[in-house]
Amino acid sequence: MARILITGGAGLIGSNLVRRLLPHHEVFVVDNLWRGKLENLHDQGKSILPNPANFHQLDLTDYQNCLKITQGMDVVYHLADIVAGINYVFSNQYFLYRQNTLINTNTLRAAIENKVKTFIYVGTACSFPLEKQQEVNCPPLKEEDTYPAHPESSYGWSKLMGEYECELAREEKLIDVGILRFHNVYGPPCELSPEKSQVIPALCRKAAKYPAEPFIVWGSGQQKRAFVHVDDVIDALIAVREKGLNQGVIQIGPAQSNSIREIAETIVRISGKNISIQYDLSKPEGDKDRTADFSKATRILGWSPRVDLQTGLERTYRWCNEYINRQR
Ligand SMILES: NC(=O)c1ccc[n+]([C@@H]2O[C@H](COP(=O)([O-])OP(=O)(O)OC[C@H]3O[C@@H](n4cnc5c(N)ncnc54)[C@H](O)[C@@H]3O)[C@@H](O)[C@H]2O)c1
């Protein structure tokens, strides 16, 4: 039974990973609850952690906290960072870059200092160069398309610098490293606030609250993304520890993308409501399109996406609707 620390374990991906690892390992969670919630680690009001003291509310921008929390761990799954919707990302570029850079460098350094055997890092498809995502239907991205680097946002840069630092540590044999790079992850439990939510939860919220909240899509809706369900992402996180260490960046996402218009229309259909969709062209829409060539993930991890978009959106909408109804 390994001692496993999950940073950002109260968030979307982290809390799902905690649930998957708990039956087999001793799991510890650290999160400062910037976006994550304790309730994501609860079932019927009770902590799912056999020992609730294994949850630590600490800020990983502080190196001493990182040293304390990584002590005695065999594995660190490092998921903590500032991730939010497009408006938050482009309105807080300096804060976001600095937070993520500090969180990443401190956590990795502390893991090395404490002789943790394995460090799993997660990057983002937002780190791919802007010019390779400028047309709709552009070819699927490969891992080697990353450089020369030119991410659109400081979020993409901060996550890329985290990958780079992990690669340096691996090259110098300081620690075993697994690196996954995710496309757009969705699924429950998700952040629904207007300030910090990403596109699918935001559209689910608007549909669930309609007509109290208008159903407004940001941008033209023509922009496309490759959406991957959180259950598929957890499969990859489990597999990378078993089969994907020290093999560079491995991309996780589907080879097909869907336009935000398609996503919005599907969510409206799932809601069963008579919703009029509005498009706000004054809002940012980010890159035009991107998809994943996931052949490296298949070759090394045996990974391919399993949850189809319709099923994934139905599950996500149901969760969001129930959550919102509970708050009323
Ligand atoms: N959700 C996506 O679409 C997506 C896509 C690509 C990569 N990723 C990466 O996956 C990882 C997890 O993302 P997620 O979607 O679960 O996001 P999330 O926001 O749900 O989880 C991140 C967690 O980190 C915590 N955190 C933030 N700052 C912290 C700090 N200073 N100290 C301690 N904890 C802190 C937050 O409270 C949150 O619970 C992130 O590294 C993110 O960059 C996510």
Image: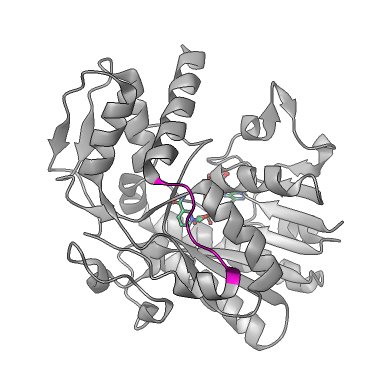
Q: Is residue 83 above or below residue 101?
A: above
Residue stretch rendered in magenta on the structure? 301-308
Q: Is residue 83 above or below residue 323?
A: below
Image location (x, y in percent) of residue 274: 21, 18
Q: How is the image coloured?
A: one colour
Residue 261 in sight from this viewpoint: yes
What residue is at 22 percent from the left and 23 percent from the top?
214
Q: Residue furthest top?
A: 328
The image quadrant that residue 286 belongs to is bottom left
What residue is at 47 percent from the left and 36 percent from the top?
191
What residue is at 33 percent from the left and 19 percent from the top?
209
> 15 and 274: which one is in front?
274
The image quadrant that residue 196 belongs to is top left
> 194 and 67: which one is in front?
194
> 197 and 298: which one is in front?
298
Image location (x, y in percent) of residue 253: 43, 60
The image quadrant that residue 145 belongs to is bottom left
Residue 177 vs residue 3: left or right?
left
Residue 140 is one of the magenta-drawn residues: no
Residue 79 in sight from this viewpoint: no
What residue is at 14 percent from the left and 45 percent from the top?
220
Residue 94 vs residue 38: left or right?
left
Image location (x, y in percent) of residue 103: 59, 60
